[in-house]
């Protein structure tokens, strides 16, 4: 289902469809942004004349490469690696690497496209990019992960650098993988270029708070949305999907702010714990032992595991999807609203389908789209780059304060932009337009490149 678009924008969208066949997630991400840009073209005719939208939809550079590696038995495997250097108007390309079997060019392009506007919203000097591989890390030994990361970097290193393109983590890529890739980059280049990757370990140039940043930031964003409603997290019943990096630190911050998270999940099912999720247990299972979320109930007898169930059927006041794209459809959104959900903050990228977004907007609940709500991760990556550039390291308290301020500013920018463009309370309009205008102005200034 799609909303009506300005005729000129519709024809640009049709061009995107023609030029990028079979990339459904990319089409979805582009459509969602273009649908909101009508009033911007009316206000800024120069964006139309300079064909800013047509140019912004086309990545500056797309790199696809072979990644061969050997498993522990000596068997050879071949995966495909990607880096899409999408837009460098505001700074070096910046965005994560995703290792997941579902990865193909359309996923990386949707994520890279979102990243352009997200990074613009942070107010920091970072362009947009994304990469990854269809490699499946599940069930692989530590040595297999290391060999894969080394092979991946053996090609990627030529395209990245602290002033050109700075990758980080995403699904399937965390501190361990960044460490192996950093080691291989250093070996191949003979350079200790700390700012070439973010999400590094604290021993070798990483930033405090980067691990927590996406989840903390998303929670700060929801806190701001709740403030607008003269409300807070205090006593709120919350559901967070996923149980990876973003989910874990979302649960942590919600709990610190007085909310109670009763459920989280992985791709096999969800757990529900009415006493509130025991986060130390989740961290031990997921971060240390790399086990499945169903094992939680072995240690918490009163909790329940539901295999294959739909986590959005659990009544909650705040929902924070933090797993993957299109995890909330129209039906799920209706269920959430019917059950009394008043705020949704997207820790994941594009977790809500267009039908779901429409349900949230029509119901006038507070809906924080991913490119605004989850920008705290990449913002703190930019703070890591700042620390690397000055060979400095900041305290946890100082860095978290910077993150909280950035999220507050993003919220305010989105809120005010939505009002200015005649859609008060609509953070989709606010985020898309505020992010787009910043990039578009820089592109105009740079001339036709
Ligand atoms: P992790 O790999 O740490 O965790 C991902 C979680 O989501 C796991 O619980 C995983 O379950 C679940 N998941 C992944 N893919 C699927 C799928 N296809 N279906 C169902 N569940 C799935 O990744 P992150 O926490 O880093 O990323 C989560 C989301 O947040 C992604 O959308 C990512 O793009 C976004 N994001 C991440 C940022 C970061 O800094 N890391 C920054 C901004 C956004 P399982 O183990 O079963 O696969
Ligand atoms: O989607 C995202 O913003 C990320 N995965 C984080 C990117 C980054 O460069 O920190």
Image (spheres, helix red, strand yellow):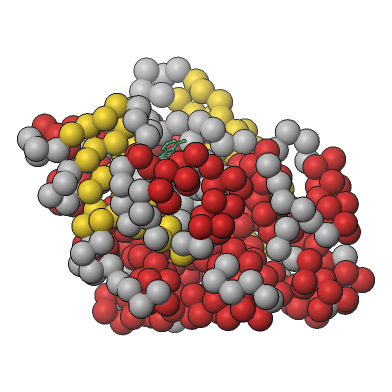
What's the residue at 80%, 42% (across, down)? 17
Give the left or right position of residue 70, taking residue 310 as reference.
Answer: right
On the rendered image, what quadrant is the C terminus found in?
bottom right
Residue nearest the observer in this picture, 32 or 171:
32
What's the residue at 66%, 81% (across, down)? 420
Can you say whether 424 is above or below 152 in the image?
below
Can you say whether 333 is above or below 238 in the image?
above
Give the left or right position of residue 409, taking residue 437 as reference.
Answer: left
What's the residue at 63%, 71% (across, down)? 423
On the rendered image, what quadrant is the N terminus found in?
top right
Residue 178 % position (x, y): 41, 51
Residue 211 % position (x, y): 33, 60
What is the quadrant of residue 425 in the picture?
bottom right
Q: Can residue 46 be seen in the rendering of this structure?
A: yes
Residue 268 % position (x, y): 34, 29
Residue nearest the observer in this picture, 84 or 404:
404
Give the tally of numbered discs: 0
Residue 60 % position (x, y): 75, 57
What's the residue at 26%, 79% (across, down)? 397
Give the left or right position of residue 256, taking residue 330 as reference.
Answer: left
């Amino acid at each position: 289902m799609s909303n009506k678009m300005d005729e000129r924008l519709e024809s640009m969208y049709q061009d995107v469809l023609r030029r990028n066949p079979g990339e459904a997630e990319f089409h979805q991400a582009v459509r969602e942004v273009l649908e909101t840009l009508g009033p911007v073209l009316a206000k800024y005719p120069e964006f139309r004349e300079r064909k800013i939208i047509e140019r912004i939809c086309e990545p500056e550079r797309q790199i696809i490469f072979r990644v061969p590696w050997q498993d522990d038995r000596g068997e050879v495997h071949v995966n495909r690696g990607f880096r899409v250097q999408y837009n460098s108007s505001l700074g070096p390309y910046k965005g994560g690497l995703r290792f997941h079997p579902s990865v193909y060019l359309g996923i990386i392009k949707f994520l890279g496209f979102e990243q352009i506007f997200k990074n613009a919203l942070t107010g920091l000097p970072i362009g947009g990019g994304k990469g990854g591989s269809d490699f499946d890390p599940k069930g692989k030994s530590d040595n297999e992960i290391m060999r894969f990361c080394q092979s991946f970097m053996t090609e990627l290193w030529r395209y990245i650098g602290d002033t050109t393109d700075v990758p980080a983590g995403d699904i399937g890529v965390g501190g361990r993988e960044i460490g192996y890739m950093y080691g291989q980059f250093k070996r191949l280049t003979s350079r200790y270029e700390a700012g070439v990757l973010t999400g590094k370990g604290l021993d070798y140039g990483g930033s405090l708070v980067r691990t927590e940043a996406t989840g903390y930031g998303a929670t700060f964003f929801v806190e701001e949305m709740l403030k607008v409603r003269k409300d807070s997290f205090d006593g709120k019943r919350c559901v967070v999907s996923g149980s990876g990096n973003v989910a874990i630190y979302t649960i942590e911050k919600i709990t610190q702010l007085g909310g109670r998270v009763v459920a989280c999940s992985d791709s096999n099912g969800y757990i529900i714990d009415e006493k509130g999720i025991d986060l130390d247990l989740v961290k031990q299972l997921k971060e240390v032992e790399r086990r499945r979320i169903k094992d939680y109930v072995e240690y918490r007898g009163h909790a329940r595991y539901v295999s294959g169930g739909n986590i959005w059927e659990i009544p909650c006041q705040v929902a924070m999807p933090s797993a993957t794209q299109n995890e909330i459809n129209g039906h799920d959104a209706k269920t959430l609203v019917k059950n009394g959900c008043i705020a949704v903050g997207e820790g994941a990228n594009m977790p809500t389908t267009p039908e779901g977004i429409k349900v949230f907007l029509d119901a006038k609940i507070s809906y924080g789209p991913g490119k605004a709500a989850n920008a705290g991760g990449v913002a703190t990556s930019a703070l890591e780059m700042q620390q690397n550039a000055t060979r400095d390291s900041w305290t946890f308290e100082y860095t978290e304060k910077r993150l909280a301020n950035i999220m507050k500013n993003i919220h305010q920018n989105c809120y005010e932009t939505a009002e200015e463009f005649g859609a008060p309370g609509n953070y989709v309009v606010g985020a898309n337009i505020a992010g787009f205008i910043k990039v578009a102005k820089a592109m105009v200034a740079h001339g036709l490149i």
